[in-house]
Image (spheres, helix red, strand yellow):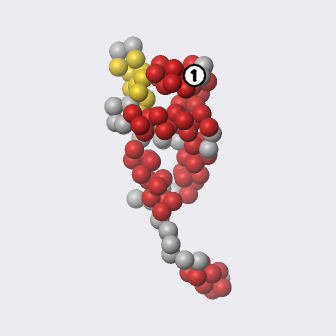
Amino acid sequence: MTIPHETAVKRLAELGHSTRLAVFRLLIKAGHPGMAVGDLQRMLAVPGSTLSHHISRLMAAGLVSQERQGRVLICRAEFDALKQLIDFLNEECCVGVDSILTQIEVE
């Protein structure tokens, strides 16, 4: 399933920030079990409020989810969203520009 262009733009924009990209990459490395927010904070050495802001932005873009387990807040990468983004980027890979030029000439 292809995601809308605007969704891809939002996700790529959020990943375009160094801290958010670092958070997302750590969550990808953690896999489906995810990672506690406290562990993310220690590994990235960022203040809690700053990390919370970046996680919120990733959540708003659909790239990260959170779940409370007792007193621990677990963050997880949304692997389906990552796959959708990769598929969006690969969708027209190597189709050539001739088809685009032909389409422009017809218009």
Quarter of the view holding residue 105: bottom right
Task: Identify the residue at image location x=48%, y=53%.
Answer: 85
104 vs 87, left or right, is: right
Label 1 crowd bin: few (<14), some (14–19), many (20+), radius 10 Å: few
Quarter of the view holding residue 46: top right
Q: Circle 1 sits in a helix, a strand or a loop, which is it?
A: loop
Q: Is residue 40 above or below residue 24?
A: above
Image location (x, y in percent) of residue 19: 60, 33
User: Label 1 sits on what residue type?
Assistant: Ala
Task: Identify the residue at image location x=40%, y=59%.
Answer: 1
Residue beneath disc 1: 45
Q: Is residue 86 visible?
A: yes
Q: Is residue 60 visible?
A: no
Task: Identify the residue at image location x=54%, y=52%.
Answer: 8
Image location (x, y in percent) of residue 52: 56, 24
| Quadrant into which the C terminus falls | bottom right
Task: Identify the residue at image location x=40%, y=17%.
Answer: 72
30 vs 62, left or right, is: left
